[in-house]
Image (spheres, rainbow, N blue to C red):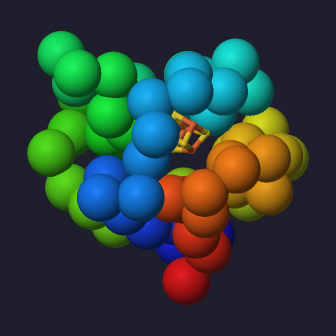
Amino acid sequence: MKVAIIPEKCIACGLCQTYSDLFDYDDDGIVKFTNSSEKVKTFSDNADILTAVKACPTKALTLL
Ligand code: SF4
């Protein structure tokens, strides 16, 4: 599964990391991938990531 983050849409609610620690935040609380500055990453199928993507209130996380 390929996941994109759109930091411009993130409202720093902190929800996604409660589902998956593959999501992290910058100093302002805006989403980033853990240990990465990339905006798109490919992961093996992962239900927690899928839940996080679906739960994001602003669609700052998307599946490609
Ligand atoms: S759930 Fe969405 S809005 Fe909330 S911190 Fe994560 S990416 Fe940002």
Q: Is residue 6 visible?
A: yes
Expressed as whole percent of the image width and height from the top left, the position of residue 21 reads: 55, 22
Question: Which residue is found at the position 79% from the left and 47% from the top?
Answer: 55
Using residue 48 as the reference point, say whether residue 27 is left or right of it.
left
Using residue 57 as the reference point, say whether residue 26 is left or right of it.
left
Question: Which residue is found at the position 37% from the left and 38% from the top?
Answer: 31
State which image quarter holds ligand 1: top right
In the depicted structure, whether residue 42 falls above or below residue 26: below
Expressed as whole percent of the image width and height from the top left, the position of residue 29 reads: 33, 22
Residue 12: image quadrant is: top left
Q: Nearer the viewer, residue 64 or 54?
A: 54
Residue 28: image quadrant is: top left
Using residue 36 as the reference point, say whether residue 43 is left or right of it.
right
Q: Nearer the viewer, residue 10 or 21?
A: 10
Expressed as whole percent of the image width and height from the top left, the position of residue 50 reads: 77, 54
Expressed as whole percent of the image width and height from the top left, the position of residue 23 reads: 47, 32
In the depicted structure, whether residue 2 falls above or below residue 51: below
- Split into 4 quadrants, where in the image is the C terminus? bottom right
Q: Is residue 42 visible?
A: no
Task: Give the total of numbered labels.
Answer: 0
In the depicted structure, whether residue 34 falls above or below residue 40: above
Residue 1: image quadrant is: bottom right
Question: Which residue is found at the position 41% from the left and 58% from the top?
Answer: 9
